[in-house]
Image (tube, rainbow, N blue to C red):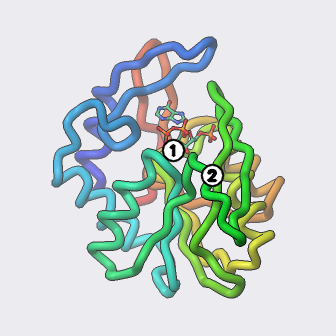
Amino acid sequence: MLDKLKKTLEESPIVKKGEYNYFVHPITDGIMLVEPDLLKEVSNAITKVADLNVDKIVCMEAMGIHIATALSLETNIPFVVVRKRCYGLEEEVAVHQVTGYSECELYINGLRKGDRILVVDDVLSTGGTMVAVLNALKSVGVEIADIVAVVEKGNGKERVKKETGYDVKTLVKVDVNGGKVVIEDSIL
Ligand SMILES: O=P(O)(O)OC[C@H]1O[C@H](OP(=O)(O)OP(=O)(O)O)[C@H](O)[C@@H]1O
């Protein structure tokens, strides 16, 4: 399982963002051809590991959007996007995102207290994004049924558990070693 994801990750070039080793991949960056079969493989794997008894899928702009779209089409579950744009709507919740190489504001709309949700994203690295979004989602009063990130790199999973109490499921765990992506583990 996940053969296309693993193979394309191992082929990913690495670029330095400051001291951060950033792998560039179709699913996480979209600047290489995103083959439909790869996206289908990722979406199908999420359906196999995630709790789909939810009202909505929640993803983060930008590179969570195509994952949520594919998953929504496969499951008929609607989705909302945590955007990088402020709308100023009454219920909007702002989130300060800090990754290993950038900072940004994110904005939550389209969710109501009591919504049962599945959170999906492309990468869990430092955990900065996921911690901030999960804590903001808790303030909205939604029920977070499950959380899935496609690629895990670094110790973000432990940080999310410590700072939010939530477990994140990740499809593939990678490391960057000698300028190459190395597959360390896979959920399927
Ligand atoms: O665990 P972290 O260290 O927070 O890194 C993970 C986040 O980094 C990327 O977001 P970013 O906003 O940089 O990129 P994108 O707009 O291309 O999704 C990625 O999409 C994740 O959301």
Q: Secondary structure at mark 1?
A: strand
Q: Secondary structure at mark 2?
A: loop
Image quarter where ligand 1 lies: top right
Residue depicted at 39% across the width and 80% down the height: 77
- The mark lying in front, picked from 2 and 1, is 2
Q: Which amino acid lies under the numbered mark 1 shown in the image of this protein?
A: Val
CA distance separating discs 2 and 1: 23 Å
Q: Percent from the top left, x then y, of residue 165?
A: 79, 64
Which of the numbered marks, if any, corresponds to residue 163? none
Residue under circle 1? 123
User: Can residue 155 be spotted in the picture?
Assistant: no
Q: Nearer the viewer, residue 21 or 79?
A: 79
Q: Is residue 94 above or below residue 143?
A: above
Q: Percent from the top left, x then y, of residue 158?
A: 73, 49
Instruction: Describe residue 177's horizontal placement relative to residue 127 as left or right.
Output: left
- CB atoms of marks 2 and 1 within 8 Å: no
Q: Nearer the viewer, residue 68 or 86?
A: 86
Residue depicted at 25% across the width and 31% down the height: 32
Crowding at dot 1, Cα within 10 Å, few <14 / some 14-19 / many 20+, comes out as many
Instruction: Describe residue 129's horizontal placement relative to residue 82 as left or right.
Output: right
Q: Percent from the top left, x then y, of residue 55?
A: 51, 85
Q: Percent from the top left, x then y, of residue 23?
A: 43, 26
Q: Which amino acid lies under the numbered mark 2 shown in the image of this protein?
A: Cys
Which of the numbered marks, if any, corresponds to residue 86? 2
Q: Nearer the viewer, residue 112 or 18?
A: 112
Q: Is residue 93 above or below residue 75?
A: above
Mark nearer the N terminus (2 vs 1): 2
Quadrant of the snapshot with the N terminus = bottom left
